[in-house]
Amino acid sequence: MNTQETMKAIVLHDLASWSVDDVPVPPVPDGGMLIRVQACGLCGSDLRTIRSGHENVTLPWILGHEICGNVVALGTGFTGPWKIGRRLSIGPNVYDPTDPYVADGRHELSANVREIAQQWPGALSEYVAIPEESIVMGNILPVPAGMPDEHAAVVEPASSVIHAHERAGTTIGDTVLIMGSGPVGCLHVAVARARGADKVFMSDIVASRLELAEAFSPDAVIDATRESVAKRVAGLTNGIGPTVVVTANPSPQAPVDAVQMVARGGRVVLFGGLPHDNSKPGIDVNTVHYRNINLIGLSRFAPRHFRMSLQMLASGRIPGEKLVTRVLPLNQANEGIRSALEGRELKVVFKP
Ligand SMILES: [Zn+2]
């Protein structure tokens, strides 16, 4: 690939300010690959960076870390197993092999994970360079034939959700409340069901988001602005409360409420991070203590979760066609980003 050539990319110039620009095609990194992007998902974290920036990102910048694409060139000294033409699902995380947690196979606990679209430019563009570090210590998997590009792009967000239910031990007989009905909340419904949960409920404060989430067929959708979520879930669980509650939203009130609603001996998964200046919400520790509640902190994932996520999307256990509600070309960046920012779509995926 000649580096004089240009490509289209969505460039974030300033907070809430982007355009589709002609930029140079990135050179093929030594030991890495050049990928023709087939599909790139727009993530909640991308939306956060567009709104309020990111500590690891200096603008202008190309975002996009949920990647499906074809190998078009291999760098000098490439040692990976993939050949030109191979279609791959590429996760952003690049682990540090010298981290003792990584050496232990507990990649999700590593504090120094680097990411494509943070330390290296992202894939909301026609081509993306995948660095050697990602070939050696990243999450890259071949995409099964017949799996749509836009489903292979959204393996990353589902990986953390799979990790969450592994930690919570969600299984047959569980009643699960998901607080938050965005795309991540919907993934929680699919994964909790796949693990055998008896009932899965969803709550949110935005009626239009709950409507979008109905595609995932939760057993009850609860509009928290119209009724008490606590009363409703108590009624739905014979007064016991859900055995698993997942906070899939950034509200500081969610963990407080989750602890009050969860069944005795239940598990609360703290999935959603809180605003940095409002992250000490005042959970009733005596409730946690006397009711033997398990609080589970959850972020990131390991390569095995990425692998399971691709399997679940390929098999339809995670219904990609319900999750990805909008597929757009790069030149419709405005419509795609706005509709996601305004919560009019679950998952927006760009196909350059
Ligand atoms: Zn993501």
Image: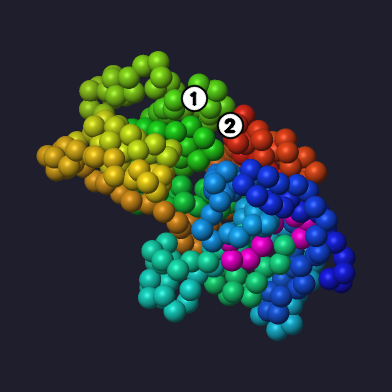
Query: Does residue 309 appear in the picture of this structure?
Result: no
Rendered image: mark on residue 19: none
Rendered image: mark on residue 206: 1
Q: Which residues are magenta?
A: 118-127
Identify which residue is drawn at 41% across, 44% down: 275
Give above or below for 20 relative to 211: below
Mark 2 residue type: Gly
Mark 1 residue type: Val
Q: Position of residue 142 (x, y in %)?
A: 66, 61
Identify which residue is drawn at 80% across, 43% down: 331
Label 2 beta carbon within 8 A of ligand 1:
no
Give above or below for 165 relative to 112: above
Query: Does residue 77 appear in the picture of this structure?
Result: yes
- Please identify the dominant SS of the magenta region: loop
Q: Nearer the viewer, residue 112 or 290?
A: 112
- In the rendered image, residue 125 lying in the magenta stretch gets the answer yes
Q: Residue 139's image quarter?
A: bottom right
- In the rendered image, residue 198 lying in the magenta stretch gets the answer no
Identify which residue is drawn at 69% across, 74% down: 32
User: Dot 2 corresponds to which residue?
Assistant: 343
Identify which residue is drawn at 39% across, 48% down: 276
Q: Decide: few, some or many residues near mark 1? Use Cα within 10 Å; few <14, some 14-19, many ≥20.
A: some
